[in-house]
Amino acid sequence: MVAYSFTSRFVPAIAAGTKTRTIRAYGKRRHARSGEALQLYTGLRTRQAKLIRVATCIRAVPVRLAFEARVLVGARIWGEPVAADELDDFARADGFAGAADMGAWWCRNRSAGSLEFDGLLIEWAP
């Protein structure tokens, strides 16, 4: 079973089943694979850790994100581009208000100003 931790911002959407995916960097630890159980937490590795839900991974695929002026301006899943007019929907599916909200959050919290990000898009069954 693979565990992922989320900031409190995403807890209501995960609990409600409207956020059914996460984007994570490649790292030393193995990520989930299709069919594996996932434990979705907030505050993991702290005394305040709380299990949000257990879910089943339905896919984990390579994703590339591009940012410009703190806005998500491009995404590729398995090398296939997400259409420009679908970027707001892409961001909303990940728990954001739209591409601008995702870009602002991402640049502030994750990418340290980097303009591109390569990682995995991990989806689970609602």
Image: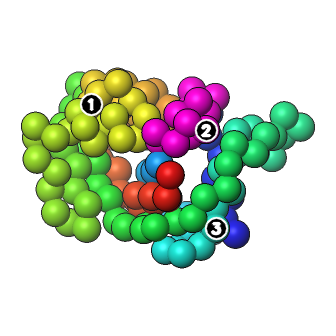
Labels 2 & 1 near each other (Cβ < 8 A): no
Residue at point 23%, 49% (across, down): 75
Task: Report how far apart the C-alphas of labels 3 and 1 lie in the structure.
Answer: 29 Å
Up the image or down, 101 lies above or below 53; here it is above
- Which quadrant of the rendered structure holds the N terminus? bottom right
- Viewer-nearest of discs 3 and 1: 3
Task: Report how far apart the C-alphas of labels 3 and 2 lie in the structure.
Answer: 16 Å
Residue at point 28%, 42% (across, down): 90
Residue ID for mark 1: 99
Q: Amino acid at mark 2?
A: Ala
Q: Residues within 10 Å of mark 1 (few under 14, many from 20)?
A: many
Indicate the secondary structure of the residue bearing disc 2: helix
Colour setup of the view: rainbow
Up the image or down, 32 lies above or below 110; here it is below
Q: Which residues are magenta?
A: 8-19
Can residue 18 be seen from the camera position used here? yes
Residue ID for mark 2: 15
Residue ID for mark 3: 37
